[in-house]
Amino acid sequence: MTSADGNVPVQPFHETFERFYGREYRQVAALAYVLTGRNGAAEDLAQEAFIAALRSWDRIALYDKPEAWVRRVVANRAVSFRRRGITELKLLPRLFRLSSPGPATEMDGEATQVWDAVRTLPRRQAQAVALRYLDDLSLKEIGVIMGCSSGTVKTHLARGRQRLERVLGAQAGEEVDGHVG
């Protein structure tokens, strides 16, 4: 780009990485938490996504929505994380009873129950539900992050909500009947 007089190069404005990180970290870490269910893993996934963004910040900063790029990285890495570590994730907390404070430890029991149920959904449904209800994103914004059309997002959301209603409704019925709790 050049200035109006044609002589001085003008750089397009883009946000500094530090400002971007400060603005987005909490929500990205929360997304990672609801997709993995583990505070430490969520923090690691969020940090990995931001490191990847920093490495290519000159390019990513010019995107219309660099936050969508980071969320896509987290959503994809959360899937890989869950695949490779399900056994370890179940075993370690039982052995050590460790807990670490993180972005989502402030949730009440009901919210924790809902996000636990979300993690049981198929991958794409869980991603769509988390992005919609955690980040309050539009269908179009979710589609950009997930790399699919708004219609596909709508389908994932509808199916995810139906499954959640069945799962959470069954759990609520068990609690009312006195079988849980």
Image (spheres, rainbow, N blue to C red):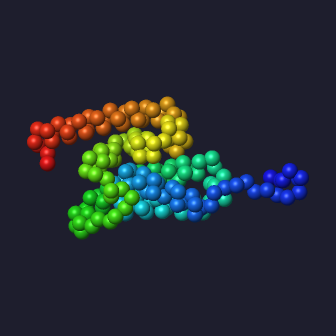
| Near-viewer residue (152 or 139) | 139
> Image check: 37 left or right of 146?
left
Tell me if I can see residue 78 in this picture.
Answer: no
Which residue: 82% across, 58% down?
9
Which residue lies most toward the bottom here? 96
Which residue lies most toward the left here? 178
> Image check: 154 left or right of 91?
right
Total tally of numbered discs in the picture: 0
Up/down of 101 relative to 170, above or below: below
Tell me if I can see residue 87 in this picture.
Answer: yes
User: Where residue 99 sits: x, y (%)?
Assistant: 29, 65
User: Where residue 22 sits: x, y (%)?
Assistant: 52, 60
Which residue: 30% across, 48% down?
111
Which residue: 58% across, 60% down?
19
> Image check: 16 left or right of 71?
right
Which residue: 45% across, 32% down?
154
User: Where residue 69 sits: x, y (%)?
Assistant: 55, 50
Q: Quadrant of residue 61?
A: bottom right
User: Where residue 60 sits: x, y (%)?
Assistant: 62, 54
Up/down of 155 relative to 56, above or below: above
